[in-house]
Amino acid sequence: MSDPALWTALADPHRRAIVALLLERPRPVGEIVEACGLSQPSTSKHLKVLREAGLVRVRQEAQRRVYALDPAPIARLDIWLAPYRELWNRSLDALGSRLDETAPDTPEDPAPKD
C-alpha cells in the first residue's frame, strides 16, 4: 500500500472515529459534528483530509452535504494487510499450542466453592 495520504488520513483518531461513524450509514456534516463532539470547522477539516485520501465521498442534498464511505480504498488496504494478518494468525496459533502444552491439567468444570 503505497498511498501515504491513506495512512495519514487514518493516523488521526478523530478521522478514524468519523470513518467508524460512516461505516454505519452516510451522514450529513451536522450529524458527524454532533456525534464526534468536534467543532464544525474542525470536522470539516477532517472530512477534507478523508475526502482527499479517497476514503469518503460527498454529495449535495438540497442545502446539506452528505458524506459516505468509499469502500475501494478500504478494500485495497485489506488486500495489502492480508499477508500480515496471516503472519499474525500463525503466531497466535503457535502461542495457543504452546500454552496448551504447558497448561496444568485442570478439570474443565471445577466444583463450586462454598
Image (cartoon, rainbow, N blue to C red):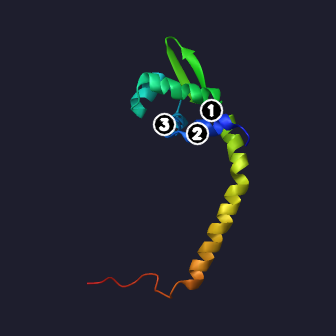
Residue 46 position within the rendered picture, expressed as x and y whole percent measured from the top left? 52, 29
Q: Is residue 43 left or right of residue 93?
A: left
CA gap, disc 2 and disc 3: 9 Å
Q: Amino acid at mark 1?
A: Leu
Task: Indicate whether 94 appears above or below 24.
Answer: below
- Quadrant position of the C terminus in the picture: bottom left
Q: Which residue extends farthest left?
A: 114
Numbered tag placed on residue 10 in the rendering: 2
Which of pointers 2 and 1 indicates the residue nearer the eye?
2
Asked whether residue 28 is in view, the answer is no
In the rendered image, is residue 4 in sight? yes
Secondary element type, mark 3? helix
Q: What residue sits 46% from the left and 82% below the top?
A: 108
- The amino acid marked with disc number 3 is His
Q: The residue under label 2 is which amino acid type?
A: Leu
**Residue lying farthest top?**
62
Q: Are marks 2 and 1 in contact (CB under 8 Å)?
A: yes
Task: Give the Cα separation between the discs numbered 3 and 1.
Answer: 14 Å
Q: Which residue is mark 1?
A: 55
